């Protein structure tokens, strides 16, 4: 009994020590997309806020390719010590499980840390497209079957499914062009190499504001606060297609609970800082309610999204290319 009591006491001391000493060196956050996109920008803003709370540098590392599975694979193989984290969207931490034969489980092999800001998708087009609204774009697509091209970030992601729904709802046909991230996709849209996209709105907001691309509709039930002049898809005549994206932060499985709690506190602190909140709002992102910022809330939301999207992806027959 004395040995048991001593062992329990030592374990408690060990957990307390880990909470007190963590972090003692820089933390790396893996972004599954190229630099310059909305997720990368948010990761760098969060890294700045977390550094102020934790007292250690938070380094952002971009690992793109294979639909984000290279990045999530790096996180899942990392030591569960709180020094390697993964930031990503529902594409990497939900939809990829229905697309790729992953060697790990998206729920069991990650520890949720916190739900980060959300952002809607919207329908955009190159500036030179001969259409001024969504109805005219659909008419142009019908008049030019199989001639238009639409950019998508990865295969089977939210933007891809959005455009598949557009085709099904309107009877239009166009080609899909996959990209590793939002930044290179937008470069080609601006340059006229592709015609349209259902894009993460925060990615393309600066280009829309600068008049370099056209935005026809937000794929949500209400207008987007960052661009209130753009109608919803319902208002534009394409009802029933609602697409938004959420972003989360994860750690490898078996990361100690006290470290998860400290990381969550750092994220919550960053999202509550007035300066950071202003920067996030400038990106067109909406911070989740306080009761949705817990690890438990992110875990529950991820499971609900898997139950929602996996059957849709499999029914659509979407395959990675």
Image: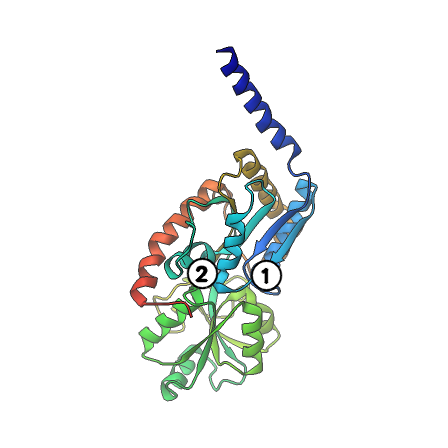
Inspect this view and state whether residue 301 appears: yes
The reply to whether residue 287 is visible in this rendering is no
- Vertical side of 21 occupied by 12: above or below: above
As drawn, the residue found furthest toward the bottom would be 143
| Front one among 58 and 79 | 79
Residue at (61, 42) in percent of width and height: 266
- The numbered dot on residue 283 is 1
User: Residue visible at 39% across and 83% down?
Assistant: 141
Q: From the top left corner, tell me how far across and down residue 23 is, in percent.
A: 65, 39
238 on left or right of 201: left
Q: State which tag comes first along the sequence, 2 or 1.
A: 2
- In contact (CB < 8 Å): disc 2 and disc 1: no
Secondary element at image label 2: strand
Name the residue beneath numbered marker 2: 244
In which image quadrant can residue 39 be found?
bottom right
- Please provide percent x and percent y for residue 135: 40, 79
Alpha-carbon distance for marks 2 and 1? 15 Å
**Label disc, if present, on residue 174 of the rendered structure:** none
Measured along the vertical axis of the image, is residue 288 above or below residue 180?
Answer: above
The foreground one among 115 and 111 is 111
Q: Position of residue 231 (x, y in %)?
A: 46, 70
């Amino acid at each position: 009994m004395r040995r048991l009591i001593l062992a329990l006491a030592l374990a408690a001391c060990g957990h307390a020590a880990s909470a007190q000493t963590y972090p003692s060196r820089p933390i790396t956050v893996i972004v599954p997309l190229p630099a310059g996109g909305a997720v990368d920008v948010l990761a760098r803003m969060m890294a700045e806020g977390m550094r102020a709370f934790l007292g250690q540098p938070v380094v952002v590392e971009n690992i793109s390719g294979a639909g984000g599975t290279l990045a999530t694979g790096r996180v899942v193989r990392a030591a569960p010590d709180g020094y390697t984290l993964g930031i990503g969207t529902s594409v990497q931490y939900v939809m990829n499980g229905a697309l790729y034969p992953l060697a790990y489980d998206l729920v069991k092999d990650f520890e949720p840390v916190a739900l980060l800001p959300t952002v809607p998708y919207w329908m955009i087009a190159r500036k030179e497209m001969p259409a001024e609204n969504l109805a005219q774009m659909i008419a142009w697509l019908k008049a030019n079957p199989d001639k238009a091209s639409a950019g998508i970030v990865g295969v089977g992601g939210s933007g891809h499914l959005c455009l598949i729904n557009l085709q099904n709802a309107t009877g239009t046909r166009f080609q899909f062009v996959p990209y590793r991230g939002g930044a290179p996709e937008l470069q080609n849209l601006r340059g006229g190499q592709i015609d349209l996209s259902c894009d993460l709105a925060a990615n393309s907001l600066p280009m829309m504001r600068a008049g370099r691309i056209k935005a026809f509709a937000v794929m949500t039930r209400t207008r987007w606060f960052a661009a209130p002049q753009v109608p919803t898809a319902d208002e534009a005549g394409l009802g029933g297609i609602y697409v938004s994206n959420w972003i989360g932060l994860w750690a490898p499985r078996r990361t100690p609970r006290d470290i998860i709690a400290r990381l969550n506190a750092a994220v919550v602190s960053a999202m509550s800082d007035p300066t950071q909140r202003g920067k996030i709002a400038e990106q067109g992102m909406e911070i989740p309610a306080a009761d949705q910022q817990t690890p438990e809330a992110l875990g529950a939301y991820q499971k609900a999204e898997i139950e929602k999207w996996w059957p849709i992806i499999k029914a659509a027959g979407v395959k990675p290319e």
